[in-house]
Amino acid sequence: MAKWVYMFTEGNANMRNLLGGKGANLAEMTNLGLPVPQGFTITTEACTQYYEDGRQINDEIMAQIMEAITKMEGVTGKKFGDKENPLLVSVRSGARASMPGMMDTILNLGLNEEVVNTLAEKSNNPRWAWDCYRRFIQMYSDVVMEVGKKYFEELIDEMKTKRGVKQDVELTAEDLKELAEQFKAEYKEKIGADFPTDPKEQLMGAIKAVFRSWDNPRANVYRRDNDIPYSWGTAVNVQMMAFGNMGDDCGTGVAFTRDPATGANGLFGEFLTNAQGEDVVAGVRTPMHITEMEQKFPEAFVQFKQVCKTLEDHYRDMQDMEFTVEHGKLYMLQTRNGKRTAQAALKIACDLVDEGMRTEEEAVAMIDPRNLDTLLHPQFDAAALKAATPMGKGLGASPGAACGKIVFTADDAVEWAERGEKVVLVRLETSPEDITGMKSAQGILTVRGGMTSHAAVVARGMGECCVSGCGDIAMDEENKKFTLAGKEFHEGDFISIDGTTGNIYDGIIPTVDATIAGEFGRIMAWADKYRTMKVRTNADTPADAKKAVELGAEGIGLCRTEHMFFGEGRIDAFREMICSTTVEEREKALAKVLPYQQEDFEGLFEALEGNPVTIRFLDPPLHEFVPTEEADIKKLADAQGKTVEEIKTIIDSLHEFNPMMGHRGCRLAVTYPEIAKMQTTAVIRAAIKVKNAHPDWAIKPEIMIPLVGDIKELKYVKKFVVETADAEIKAAGSDLQYEVGTMIEIPRAALTADEIAKEADFFCFGTNDLTQMTYGFSRDDAGKFLNAYYDAKIFENDPFAKLDQVGVGKLMKMAIELGRPVNPNLHVGICGEHGGDPSSVEFCHKIGLNYVSCSPFRVPIARLAAAQAAIAEKNA
Ligand code: PEP
Ligand code: MG
């Protein structure tokens, strides 16, 4: 018989795949002798089984759960459903990888009218008893029956107004009892049945709801963003309740052993007296700083600090803990490696090395490469920031600089961002449903909530700028406006927020590019020490190339030459070339383009100072360049001595039904060799000129022919490239060397790579096209159906962003295995979008690529991911 349920005493930290992070760590804390309310974990395998059984908990699992309840009764001396001495439990999710706020929690389970009445009487604390009950009905209705929070919150607000109080804690036992009645009535109206009284029924309902929450939309989005497979499932933890809401000698808190925003070493967190866990995270009341707990609960605080040290030393990482104090006694409810901003991650990793807790390699492995992205985003211009006066201040909950137009709902954020607007999402408080909107925004500003509120936690996880808890904002969400510092702001008004200081500014503050320095520099230097794969960049202009070199690029893996034609003055000559009807006409137009190309290539060689530069010859279908405006057509016609009608006829003739599989790539060079010849001349002349100016630079241009599917295509084009290049070199009396290689971006090229390798000095995987052609999905249109694919669980990720290792990856592996034996000097890289995606970079390392190439701002991400792949391989 399979084992589906583990008591906390049966597990340990190494069992996170089976017990989830929370369950494994509750077990580990139990083993460490820390004060953990006891309970059990239902495994992630049980979750998978639940889905296999058609979203049912089967009898075997159910029996093991009830057996565990009996064991819990033995340990706690309480009884499930008992009036006199009831065992009340929390039911909480806990996946392998932590997904804060994504799934559901139910507290105080096991209560019913009878139990609560006795509890109210016996405990001498009716307020607590009724508070627990109303919370339970509220959470159960919301989480299990999906009635929705808002009805209950409205009832609470009504009650507070009626009683003339502001805070939930000011409501009396009688008020809470009345609320519980109202809640139950609300439940009955919405569900059409009485609120369940049988604790076993409540428990199974709650467990099912947690399993079900694995598949809720926000969890699905979170998983996609964080590379967490759907197949993992979530575990469920059932734990005896410890009560932070029994009075003023009770409370609950969330704390980190180091500051999750800056990484500073020292206890950081928040605490609320007379409250239950969700109050802190939900931002219902603004909590006090953790250090204030020292005055209120001196003994528990000393013990808590000791626990923090024990846990950090044990896990050798910053911990994020939840705890409760019940009548002065400390209970630990959770510990995990804390989510942190990119800055904090770098600082903590470096500090842990300096403190002797971690090795350099471990420090490199601790940083999530995707997080680095935020550090490379623009920061506020220091001078402009100094000159600006903040109009308000909240908590600097997640660092960064954000400016944009104000929007008030998550849906608006998504919609406006899709239109290309930069927006700042301003909310009273955020809830997990807002996640897509939060992602679309540049930054998030909330009126309520502390450093551990949902908005703060999620924003930090996403690396997005967030200012939370600006209580000075008078918000009118309904009418999409707010007042701050005496000024009324409406949807669409500009605002800037500083996620480091918490300052809020009217209007736009200019930003500047970020640089790699300090701890960032230290980690990147370690990454470079341990990685074996090179990192190049995709850059089309000298400015981009310089930026990429600053960020650590060791070469250009892809220069898309067509992007050079869009500049002022250039497009005209290029259009003349396209609309030529004879070779002579075309050559005349190309002669005008040549100097521009040469100048650009010189800039690239200069920027790379002798590091490799791969120049990809003209690739896109020509219709992308022709004029659409009447005036431009006229201008072109005049320049070529043609009529407007003639030009229009030529433009029409360029129309293709399937342009991405049409007249593009090397097919253009086959049809119009003079284009490739001109490009060869420009490359070689530029290289010779820069080489002559810098004899010590190892300049060796790499000419890359795109979209080859047949060896004969490559041979045909290569022949006149080589003839042209050699003639140029000879005429200049130079000894310049160069290479001619090809992109592998058509499945047939991968399948016949042994043939192609005979003619190619290098392969570079164009995984954008290779994905397009392997799947047969248009890279420009796949977005239209990908959401349906996610919903149907056909895809968990966009294959254009994260490499399909199974299919496309197999072609890549095959191409390398076929190509290298034929040409032992063959060097192999990747320059599709995947070259900057961490999991794809790892795959590239595994299959033995020499380099990955990605956009300049992803270069540090690729450097780190490559190092992590090398370290993981070494340790395997
Ligand atoms: C590719 O196809 O992956 C590639 C890099 O080329 P492009 O995106 O320019 O087609
Ligand atoms: Mg391509």
Image (spheres, grey):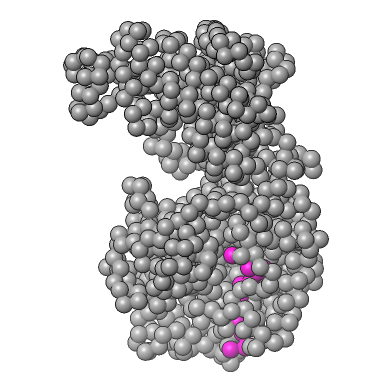
- Depth check: give the residue in front, 692 or 275: 692
Position of 864 relative to 410 (above/below): above
Q: Is residue 659 left or right of residue 339?
A: left
- Depth check: give the residue in front, 787 or 600: 600
- The residue sitting at 66% across, 57% down in the picture is 518
The reply to whether residue 851 is visible in this rendering is yes
- Depth check: give the residue in front, 125 or 258: 258
Quarter of the figure with the C terminus: top right
Quarter of the figure with residue 856: top right
- Depth check: give the residue in front, 555 or 276: 555
Q: Position of residue 108 (x, y in %)?
A: 57, 74
- The residue sitting at 62% across, 78% down in the picture is 290
Q: Position of residue 184 (x, y in %)?
A: 42, 74
- The residue sitting at 59% across, 44% down in the picture is 550
Q: Position of residue 127 (x, y in %)?
A: 52, 87
- The residue sitting at 42% across, 34% down in the picture is 782
- Name the residue furthest bottom: 124
Q: Which residues are magenta?
A: 248-261
Quarter of the figure with residue 336: bottom right
Quarter of the figure with residue 537: top right
Residue 253 part of the magenta segment: yes
Q: How many marks?
A: 0
Q: Position of residue 81 (x, y in %)?
A: 60, 75
The reply to whether residue 102 is visible in this rendering is no
Residue 437 part of the magenta segment: no
Q: Is residue 834 left or right of residue 468?
A: right
Q: Is residue 352 left or right of residue 556?
A: right
Position of 818 relative to 699 (above/below): above
